Image (spheres, rainbow, N blue to C red):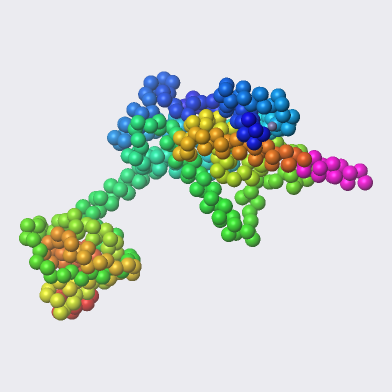
């Protein structure tokens, strides 16, 4: 065992972190090496100092953190439940009227007719609505067929057209109805184009 | 809660006296949405966790906040917990990582606000203070530990101040035990060198102070 190796063994040995076999080898080296013996002495002293204040800094817990943790867990799950409920109830207008630029032009691909048209949002609608977050204007491009040129504008990023194209959105009238109810606006008179 | 901090408490509180329910069972129940089961885990581990965090942040309120944050995160990640492993090390790993992240952010913040340094952000440095003032050994030790790089410091704190075994530390820090042992030896060596130097300096300045006083 050389001195370098012996020193790291000493550093472990002072804290009781070497096994029997290593300890024996170390003792053999120490018997022959005064420098390492001096090192062992310094190491013992410093470790003692290190471990000394462990008890005075001991922390006595009077109040458990559990009540706080529990109430924060409750808030979290309430927020989560509210979010789901809001989506289920078509997100009230207030929740989606803040920022985020969302320009959505709904294209006129023929949509499968096997969807509910009763106004209930479909899962794909929810994805879009979540990303919409906020809408502060709706425009209708008159050059498009009714319902196909609906645009929603906000203040942030834009939403790709294919988000909508890829979806299983129902027919455009249902979508329009959905948007109007979400934004709290009344269904426009198409002739005005912008509102 | 009959709770007194016990430094020698094993890392895994497998069975709480009187409750008879193991961690694994409680984790399973908490995963199923049982809040009380999770509360039981919090009560089992909070003292030890706060003590460990305190070794890094030295501020009781901050340590409590970090412990709360840890438990929230643990709860959120219960799904990711590998049930074949022990809960204790996994939980401490989240807590220690959170604490080290907090320290890194704080360090960055302090660096950014060098001109408006708050006295409260740093522990007093007794070696540069009046050597004739009474020396608080634990503050001295603290100041020396704080000079050791984080990789070594965390191992040193967990082993020598908190009494975790090297295999437990390996689990907490997600490293091989050989790495932990190597870092531990290195950390103790660095502490020893810094400590010796500091004592020599303190002794030197105390001697100078005495001579000044004699004049
Ligand atoms: Zn030697």
Q: Quadrant of residue A8?
A: top right
Per the rendered image, the range of residues in magenta is B201-215
Q: Which quadrant does ligand 1 occupy?
A: top right
Relative to B3, is A109 on the left or the right?
left
Relative to B34, is A88 on the left or the right?
left
The picture places residue B84, in percent across and down from the top left corner, at: 35, 31
Relative to B183, is A143 on the left or the right?
left
| Frontmost residue, A29 versus B17 | A29
Residue positioned 22% across, 74% down in the render: A139
Query: Would residue B99 be seen by someone viewing this image from the given angle?
Result: yes
Q: Is residue B34 magenta?
A: no
The picture places residue B63, in percent across and down from the top left corner, at: 53, 41
Decide: is B180 above or below A143. above
- Assign the magenta stretch its main secondary structure: helix
Relative to B137, is B8 on the left or the right?
left
| Frontmost residue, B46 versus A46 | A46
């Amino acid at each position: 065992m050389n001195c370098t190796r012996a020193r790291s063994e000493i550093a472990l040995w002072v804290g009781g972190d070497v096994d029997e076999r290593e300890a024996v080898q170390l003792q053999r080296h120490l018997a022959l090496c005064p420098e390492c013996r001096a090192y062992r002495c310094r190491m013992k002293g410093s470790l003692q100092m290190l471990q000394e204040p462990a008890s005075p800094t001991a922390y006595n817990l009077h109040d458990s953190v559990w009540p706080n943790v529990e109430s924060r867990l409750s808030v979290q799950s309430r927020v989560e439940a509210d979010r789901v409920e809001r989506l289920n109830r078509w997100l009230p207008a207030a929740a989606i009227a803040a920022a985020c630029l969302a320009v959505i032009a709904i294209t006129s691909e023929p949509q499968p007719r096997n969807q509910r048209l009763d106004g209930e949002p479909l899962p794909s609608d929810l994805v879009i609505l979540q990303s919409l977050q906020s809408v502060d204007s709706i425009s209708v491009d008159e050059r498009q067929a009714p319902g196909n040129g609906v645009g929603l504008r906000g203040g942030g990023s834009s939403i790709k057209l294919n988000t909508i194209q890829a979806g299983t959105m129902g027919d455009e009238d249902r979508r329009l109805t959905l948007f109007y109810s979400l934004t709290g606006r009344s269904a426009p008179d198409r002739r005005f184009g912008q509102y | 809660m009959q709770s007194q901090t016990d430094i020698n408490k094993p890392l895994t509180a497998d069975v709480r006296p009187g409750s008879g329910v193991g961690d694994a069972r409680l984790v399973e129940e908490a995963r199923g949405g049982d809040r009380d089961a999770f509360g039981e885990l919090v009560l089992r581990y909070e003292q030890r966790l706060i003590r460990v965090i305190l070794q890094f942040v030295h501020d009781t309120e901050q340590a409590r906040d970090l412990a709360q944050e840890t438990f929230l995160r643990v709860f959120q990640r219960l799904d990711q917990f590998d049930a074949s492993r022990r809960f204790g090390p996994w939980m401490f790993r989240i807590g220690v990582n959170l604490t080290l992240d907090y320290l890194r952010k704080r360090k960055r913040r302090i660096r950014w606000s060098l001109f408006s340094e708050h006295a409260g952000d740093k522990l007093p440095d007794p070696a540069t203070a009046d050597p004739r003032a009474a020396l608080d050994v634990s503050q001295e030790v603290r100041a020396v530990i704080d000079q050791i790089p984080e990789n070594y410091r965390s191992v040193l704190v967990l082993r020598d101040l908190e009494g975790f075994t090297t295999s437990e530390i390996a689990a907490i820090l997600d490293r091989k035990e050989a790495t932990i042992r190597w870092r531990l030896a290195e950390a103790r060596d660095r502490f020893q060198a810094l400590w010796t130097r500091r004592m020599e300096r303190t002794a030197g300045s105390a001697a100078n102070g005495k001579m000044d006083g004699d004049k």
